[in-house]
Amino acid sequence: MSSTGRLIDLRSDTLTAPTDAMRKAMAEAEVGDDVYGEDPTVNKMQSLAADLCGMEDALFVSTGTMGNLLCVLGHCFERGSEVMLGNSSHLYRREQGGPAQWGGVNMNPLPNRKDGTFSLDDVRSKFHNGKDFHETKTSLIAIENTMNGRIVPMNFIKELRQLANELNVPIHMDGARLFNAAVGLNVPVSSITQYVDSVSICLSKSLGAPVGSVIVGSKPFIARTRRIRKALGGAMRQSGVIAAAGILALTDMVKRLHIDHENAKTFAKGIIQYYPNYVNLNMDETETNMVWFDVNTKLPTHDGRNSAQEFCYRMANRYNDDDVVVKMFGFFGVSIRCVFYNGVSQADVKLALEKFHSVMKAWISESNVS
Ligand SMILES: Cc1ncc(COP(=O)(O)O)c(C=O)c1O
């Protein structure tokens, strides 16, 4: 690409690079041995996360996958346990069946709706209370918020809490992007976490830290997960160096998330405005930093690509001598995902829309779809 060219990478908010302030904080971080609980920066980040979520304690972990795994294992410590969860969730689909693989915990998936909810009647009917010794025992219900950029409705979370109380089972929330949900609803994050028993929050996605997640919960629960983290080789030493960026993730970076949400909306509006016959996108589903859409499957494709892959291919290649390359994710075969994060500016949104127009114009001209 020429020196004037621009790569706009909308594949994921995991592409955030640490800010200058984060790099400075990391260089200057006061550290100690966190296995002894003596790293002041880790301790500060953990207290901050716990306070923000209104929980007793927190634990710094390497990734979202490890956070979810530790939380499941921390709740499902009885042999023969299962976690009940949505069948579209990251924990169910994209973490290699970690709970089963490392903890012998069965997974009981329920059909997920697009907004992250599932039927409470399903929870009731598929719940295993452990009295029948032929069955696993449901020791945890897990939900994800945001799910694919959608904010899980608060009334669902409240009703699930009531049901979980009745069934005497804890709730875990995969809150990889929970702060996006809180900002989208304009509420403190604790107003969501008050209804669950544990949360795993990714510092390294929309919040921009280079590494790490933090899990929160009660003191005894976090003590259990701390023990499991050590066994899994996830206890780190002078990890204050990276927790320093986590502190800024939980403070300064939360304050700017609304910008990503605005950029996502501007982009979504821009792509349906001119090509309503070729793009299928529901504006109501653009609630936080993600935009999902499908393109018309009648448009011509090449080299065995499906329409989503063809579209992503065209966006990621130079076209008509333009100098802008836009990377997007073709998901589940048909849908396209674009994610907005620190590092994708308003000007980038404009450039990406221009690229979109030139790609669509050329693509439509090759087809006989009207
Ligand atoms: C909702 C959700 N949960 C958990 C994870 C896992 O995070 P990590 O990649 O840090 O393991 C991801 C990663 O994309 C995610 O999107």
Image (tube, rainbow, N blue to C red):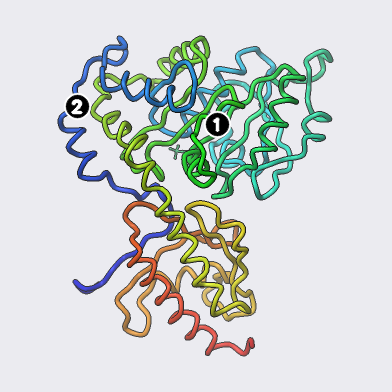
The spot of residue 265 in percent (x, y) is 49, 62
The spot of residue 188 in percent (x, y) is 49, 35
Q: For mark 2, does the 10 Å Cα neighbourhood hold few (<14), some (14 to 19), or many (20 or more) residues?
A: many
The spot of residue 341 in percent (x, y) is 39, 52
The residue nearer to you, when weighing 292 against 301, is 292
The residue nearer to you, when weighing 94 against 361, is 361
Residue under pointer 1: 191
Kindly check if marks 2 and 1 are in contact, taking CB atoms under 8 A apart as contact: no
* Quadrant of res 26: top left
Judged left or right of residue 350, residue 69 is: right
Cα–Cα span, label 2 and label 1: 31 Å
* Quadrant of res 166: top right
Reply above or below: 360 against 52.
below
Q: For mark 1, does the 10 Å Cα neighbourhood hold few (<14), some (14 to 19), or many (20 or more) residues?
A: few
Query: What is the three-letter code of the residue carrying label 2?
Result: Ala
Residue occupying the point 38% across, 36% down: 203
The spot of residue 274 in percent (x, y) is 54, 80
Reply above or below: 277 against 7.
below
Residue occupying the point 77% across, 35% down: 120
The residue nearer to you, when weighing 278 against 81, is 278
Considering the numbered disc 2 on the image, is that residue within a helix, a strand or a loop? loop
Query: What is the three-letter code of the residue carrying label 1?
Result: Ser
Q: Which numbered circle lies on residue 29?
A: 2
Locate the N terminus and report the quarter of the image it occupies.
bottom left
Reply above or below: 27 against 236.
below
Locate the C terminus and report the quarter of the image it occupies.
bottom right
Judged left or right of residue 196, residue 202 is: left
Of the image marks 2 and 1, the number of the one nearer the N terminus: 2
Judged left or right of residue 173, residue 20 is: left
